[in-house]
Amino acid sequence: MNNQSQLIYHITTAESWEKAKSMGFYEADSLAVEGFIHCSTEDQVAGVLERYYQGQTGLVKLTIDRQKVDRPVIFELAGSINEVFPHIHGVLNLDAVIDVNPVHG
């Protein structure tokens, strides 16, 4: 699967997802700090969980159809691990999320 796959993924808490549903859009903390929402390709999800979410519970994986995302989705280099990741530059419209699954750690 190449980096330009139509589906991208985002890990968040079930609590944040519930909040997004009540607000009508999803916003990650990184949006305020870095200007984008971190996402990953299917191949990158396991590594992201390992690096950033070790031992956390109550997580969900959002499956996002990037063609439905209202804001720019840009594949950018994460220098720390030298991999290119998809970033959503703005809030995520909920209709772009096509599936939500619990993450079993």
Image (tube, rainbow, N blue to C red):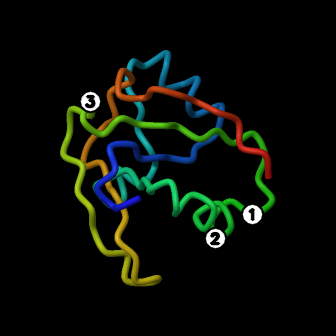
Residue 15, relative to residue 32: is it above or below? above
Between the residue at mark 3 and the residue at mark 2, the CA separation in whole angstroms equals 28 Å
For badge 2, the amino acid type reads Arg
For badge 1, the amino acid type reads Gln
In front: 101, or 1? 1
In front: 90, or 85? 85
Residue position marked by numbered label 3 in the rendering: 68
Between the residue at mark 3 and the residue at mark 1, the CA separation in whole angstroms equals 30 Å
Residue position marked by numbered label 2 in the rendering: 51
Q: Quadrant of the N terminus?
A: bottom left
Q: Residue at x 34, y 50 (%)?
A: 5
Q: Would residue 58 be found to the left or right of residue 52 on screen?
A: right
Q: Are marks 2 and 1 in contact (CB under 8 Å)?
A: yes
Q: Does dot 2 land on a helix, a strand or a loop?
A: helix
Q: Does dot 3 land on a helix, a strand or a loop?
A: helix
Q: Residue at x 64, y 38 (%)?
A: 60
Q: Does dot 1 land on a helix, a strand or a loop?
A: loop
Q: Position of residue 38 (x, y in %)?
A: 41, 55
- Dividing the picture into quadrants, the one containing residue 86 is bottom left
Q: Would residue 23 be found to the left or right of residue 53 on screen?
A: left
Q: Residue furthest front?
A: 1
Residue position marked by numbered label 1 in the rendering: 54
Q: Earlier in the sequence, mark 3 or mark 2?
A: 2
For badge 3, the amino acid type reads Lys
In front of the other: label 3 or label 2?
3
- Dividing the picture into quadrants, the one containing residue 69 is top left
